[in-house]
Image (tube, grey):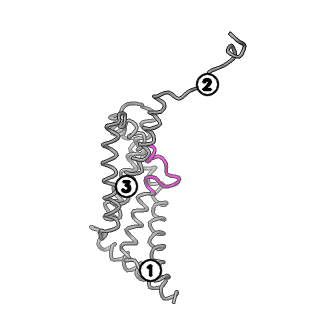
Amino acid sequence: MTSDETHTVPGHRPTDDDALDAVIEGWSRLFAYLVVAVVAGFTVVLPFFGLLLALAGASYLRAGDLHARRHRGGLLRTLAGPLTAPLDLVRGAAGTLVTVPYAAAVAVAVPLIVMAGAATDVEVAPLVGAAWGAGAAAYVLLAAPGVRTPRRHLVRVFTAFADEPRRIAWAGVLLCALGLAAVVGAIMLRPSFAPVYELENSIAQELSHFQHSVHRHAL
C-alpha cells in the first residue's frame, strides 16, 4: 500500500437514493407552484370564494407546518396532523392574518396599475382588473416573497406523496390540467363577485372613475 493510498479519504458520492430524493423534491416544488396557480386562477374567476379558499388553505398549511416540525410521519400525518392539534390551527390562522395587509395592498395596487393602462389607450373592464387583483392577493397569501410557510408545507406534502414514479406521473398530469384550466378560465371567463354584489358595484364604479381620470389627464 502506498502513502497516497494510506491517506486518501474517499469523498461523498451521490447515491441512487440521493438522486431520487432530489428528483422528488424538484417535482414537489413544481406541484406546489401548480397548486398556487390553480388557486390564483380560480380566484380570478370567483374572487370571493377564491379568497376564502386561499385564506383557509394558507391557514391550514401553516398549521400543518407547525405540526410537522414536532411530529414526523407519513402522508396521512402530514395532511391530517393539524386536525388533532387545535392550537396549531389557531396559530396557523393568526399567521395568515399577519399577511392579510400584504395581500390587501397587492389586491389594491394591481387593479390600479391595470387601470392606469388607460393612459396608453388600453382599456380594461374594471371588474377584470379587480379580479386580477384578487388573484394576486391569493398568490400573496400562499407563496409571495416573504411568505414561505404555506408553500413549504405544500412541498412537504407532495414529497410524502410522490414516493414512486407512478404517483409523480398522475399528480403531474392532474395538476398540469388543472393549472391550464385555471389560466384559461382566468383569461376567458367573466369574473363574478357573487355573492357580494354591492361590493362588486362599488369596485366597478371606483375603478371606472379612476380609469376615466387617468385617460383624461393623459390627453
Residue found at x 45% / y 77%: 115
Residue found at x 46% / y 44%: 152
Task: Find disc 3 in the rendering and name its residue.
Answer: 54
Task: Give the label on residue 11, or none.
Answer: 2
Which amino acid type corresponds to the residue marked 1 in the rendered image?
Val
Q: Which residue lies furthest to the top in this view?
A: 1
Q: 175 and 217: which one is in front? A: 175
Q: What element carries label 2?
A: loop
Q: Distance of mark 2 from mark 3, alpha carbons?
A: 46 Å
Residue 211 horizontal/vertical position (percent) = 44, 81
Q: 125 and 205: which one is in front? A: 125
Residue found at x 38% / y 30%: 73
Bounds of the magenta span?
Answer: 140-152
Q: Distance of mark 2 from mark 1, alpha carbons?
A: 60 Å
Task: Find disc 1 in the rendering and name its residue.
Answer: 122
Tell which tag, 2 or 1, sits nearer the viewer: 2
Q: How many labels does the image show?
A: 3
